[in-house]
Image (cartoon, grey):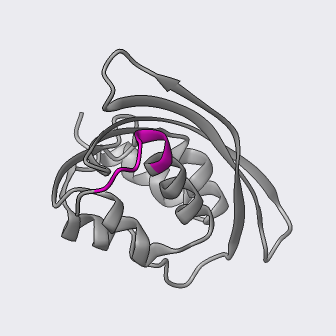
Amino acid sequence: MTSDRTPREVFLALVDGIAGERWDELPGLYAERTDVTHPLHPLRVPALRTRDELREHFRPPGAGPRLRRRVSDVVVHETADPEVIVAEFAYRGVVEDTGEQFTQPAILVLRVRDGEIVESRDYLDHLTSARVRGQLDEVIAAVKIAPR
């Protein structure tokens, strides 16, 4: 799919789609062959290289706490390369079951070509995500036994 969408527009569609839980729309923002990494993920998850892998990644969450979130504090930095932006933002939300509020800051470095993400480095606060999903103990245990 070729599009005239700018990197900024693609970024906004991505984070708004995540906040709005429009999971089926998200893989279409990426090129068929892509390179998405999470360099700071505590479990050192592998890169996502195809739209099919992203479809699986964005599979709607199963059982677990219901989260309501919105995108805030968006700052998009243009770079000398017209395909690349650096976007700072946060998801601000609430765990609906408990009323707990949370803020998950993030930075994405995106390369968008022909309106599709061909490369992304996602620097997210994964520990806050695990905590609000009730998975923090599981992540900490996995980090303790992970090879170094």
Assess whether residue 5 is covered by the magenta stretch: yes
- Pick out the residue farthest to the left: 33
**Residue depicted at x 41% and y 42%:** 6
Residue 60 lies, in percent from the top left, at: 46, 79
- Pick out the residue farthest to the bottom: 63
**Residue depicted at x 44% and y 50%:** 10
Residue 146 in which image quadrant: top left
- Relative side of 132 to 100, left or right: left
Residue 35 lies, in percent from the top left, at: 20, 45
**Residue depicted at x 32% and y 41%:** 120
Vertical placement of 39 versus 35: above or below?
above
The image quadrant where one finds the C terminus is top left
- Pick out the residue farthest to the top: 80
Total marks placed: 0
Residue 19 lies, in percent from the top left, at: 62, 62
- Relative side of 85 to 20, left or right: left
Residue 106 in which image quadrant: top right
Residue toward you, 68 or 83: 83
Vertical placement of 18 versus 127: above or below?
below
**Residue depicted at x 41% and y 40%:** 7
Residue 82 in which image quadrant: top left
Residue toward you, 101 or 91: 91
Q: Which residues are magenta?
A: 3-9
Assess whether residue 19 is covered by the magenta stretch: no
The image quadrant where one finds the N terminus is bottom left
Residue 102 lies, in percent from the top left, at: 75, 51
- Pick out the residue farthest to the right: 99
